[in-house]
Image (cartoon, helix red, strand yellow):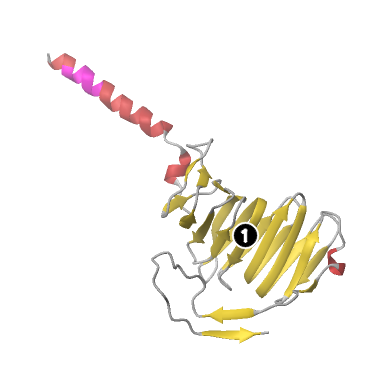
Amino acid sequence: MRIFFLFKSILFISALSLTATLVPAQDSSPAIATLLQIEGGVEVVTDKSPKGRRGRDGMLLFAGNKIRTSGKSKATVEYRDGSRIRLFQNSEFMLDLSEEQNTSRRTFKYLLTLNNGSLRGRFKKGLQRTKIRTPTALIGVKGTSVRITENKNKATVSLTEGQVEVSNLSSRAIINPGQWLPEFGRTDDLSKKVVPIPNLLNLKTDEYEFDFRNGKSKQLEFSVQL
């Protein structure tokens, strides 16, 4: 009887060891962002769910995760440094890389991909270095509020704060606040396409995003720039 129990214990320990070995590496890696403020159906593709699973508020996101929004859905991705990305309808977005930099201040390096759709990003100045790839261009972000749209190999980039550097296969350009690059392709001369944003109304508040889903009113203080 003692031999039987000993053999059973060895089998149980071996099974536990095998289970631990089969756990995907993603679980041992730190989460790099959180999914928030979901509206409608949002799908998240992970190593465990290659066909996609339904996203939920507070869901942890890891490097390599892909987020898809449908025709009537939106979602926010919040990084550890407080940088936020709002994804709009019919978008496909991938979190390629997040690395903490070995500097005197705690800073991060992000590499992201927008395969299709549009986003609005609010990135913390001085705390991150971000590059966003699309099928059309590579956008380097420097502490910025930026809007990016990619549709059928045409990209649009507009800027309200900070600075971005945009490059495609043939050229590059710097965009400053109040400027945009409307509907450019992979080989367009970007230096000739940077123009002021038409009819720009800039409303600035202390808070970046507001949630009115609870139906309650909010008192806001803001400045207006025409």
Which residue is outermost to the left? 1
Residue at the (59%, 80%) spot, across then down: 203
Q: Is residue 149 visible?
A: yes
Q: Is residue 183 left or right of residue 140?
A: right
Could you tell me the amino acid type at mark 1?
Leu
Residue at the (26%, 24%) spot, across then down: 12
Taking the magenta stretch, the answer to whether it contains residue 6 is: yes
Which is nearer the eye, 139 or 105? 139
Horizontal and vertical percent position of residue 205: 53, 80
Which is nearer the eye, 79 or 6? 79
Which is nearer the eye, 7 or 44? 44
Marks counted in the figure total 1
User: What's the magenta region?
Assistant: 5-10
Taking the magenta stretch, the answer to whether it contains residue 99 is: no
What secondary structure is marked by label 1?
strand
Quadrant occupied by the N terminus: top left
Residue at the (72%, 64%) spot, across then down: 157
Which is nearer the eye, 63 or 7? 63
Quadrant occupied by the C terminus: bottom right
Horizontal and vertical percent position of residue 210: 47, 70
Q: Is residue 156 left or right of residue 10?
A: right
Horizontal and vertical percent position of residue 22: 42, 31
Horizontal and vertical percent position of residue 153: 77, 50
Q: Which residue matches tag 1?
A: 119
